[in-house]
Amino acid sequence: MAPTVNNLSVVLFVFISVLPSTLSIILKYPAIINFGDSNSDTGNLISAGIESVYPPYGQTNFKLPSGRYCDGRLIVDFLLDAMDMPFLNPYLDSLGLPNFKKGCNFAAAGSTILPANPTSVSPFSFDLQISQFIRFKSRSLELLAKTGRRYERYLPPSDYYAKGLYMIDIGQNDLAGAFYSKTLDQVLASIPSTLETFEAGLKRLYEEGARNFWIHNTGPLGCLAQNIAKFGTDSTKLDEFGCVSSHNQAAKLFNLQLHALSNKFQAQFPDSNVTYVDIFSIKSILIANYSQFRFENPIMVCCGIGGAPLNYDSRISCGQTKVLDGTTITAKACNDSSEYINWDGIHYTEAANHFVSDQILNGKFSDPVFSDQMPFLLSIKL
């Protein structure tokens, strides 16, 4: 269960400067249902037995691997913390008496919007995650109806599904994976069909009673060390911050169309509440102005091998020990992950996730921005 946070430090931007304030955030949502990829996976891919993570994953907060692809907490963890809600249990984790009363996490690392194929890291595409949710809902209501009060402590009642918040953060792997077999023009041309699949998923959730949607756009993919190492060997393909221009161009177009889709869905279903969150802008501001936010390395990986400028080698993952070029090497963590934005070449550190969640919670990067018409009650405590 997440520790209770009554006062949250929120960063407010005045141009690029920071003005801290404290907010106690009370949400009206009784439950949170989450879909996505490794950006919000709290243990599904690991619980499925598809992959394993080892120390130093989890070292910052949990002190051991927690199923998260991070040294500590994810953005979703900080958001739940701020809502005074427990961390979300992964749907596939059957051990430790998981409690789903206030929500469930269906996100799985490596997942895509489009259906998985034989080479996919994760079989749990967006559509399959929604099918898992529908099964979860059906089985939960069946158990509650048959057993009376026996499972009330562990499962959400029927009204929670309409009142709950449905958080979605997926699409990064569709774009990043496409570049391995497609040109930039082909990747850009594939975005509309990918988002058609996403829209079909939203409609399935709506048909199941979902009304409150929180949709994250995708971040600056070109600034991840994994993509720089593979596609950025030619310096002319990098932007002023050392990021792969083509990947960020694709992310921007994806986000533009995702934003339009979110507005279209809101208009088509006026009884829904759709919040679009601009993760790309938050992360781009962090990378471009990292030193102002007390980070030392905007691109270089904390847990990897090879040293500057990337400290990343695709042949060995964080925490692994392998023989490379005749030498036994272990991909170890840096001394202080709070100085780094990137944890393992693909995922952000807990410190960077904390920064991003703070910016989300100030409301300026959302459409609509947090205001009286939003389903939030912001109570300022001085």
Image: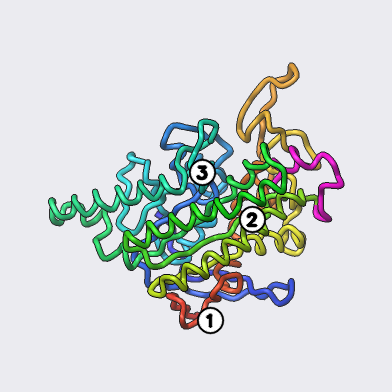
Residue appearing at x 34%, y 66% in the figure: 30
Return the residue nearer the eye: 306 or 112.
112
Q: Is residue 355 visible in the rendered structure shown here?
A: no
Disc 1 and disc 2 in contact, CB within 8 angstroms: no
Q: Residues within 10 Å of mark 1 (few under 14, many from 20)?
A: few
**Disc 1 secondary structure class:** loop
Q: Which residue is mark 2?
A: 219
Return the residue nearer the eye: 185 or 211.
185
Q: Is residue 338 left or right of residue 375?
A: right
**Mark with earlier residue (1, 2):** 2
Q: Write down the quadrant of residue 153 in the picture.
A: bottom left
- The magenta region covers 223-241
Magenta-colored stretch includes residue 248:
no
Q: Amino acid at mark 1?
A: Leu
**Mark with earlier residue (3, 1):** 3
Q: Amino acid at mark 3?
A: Ser
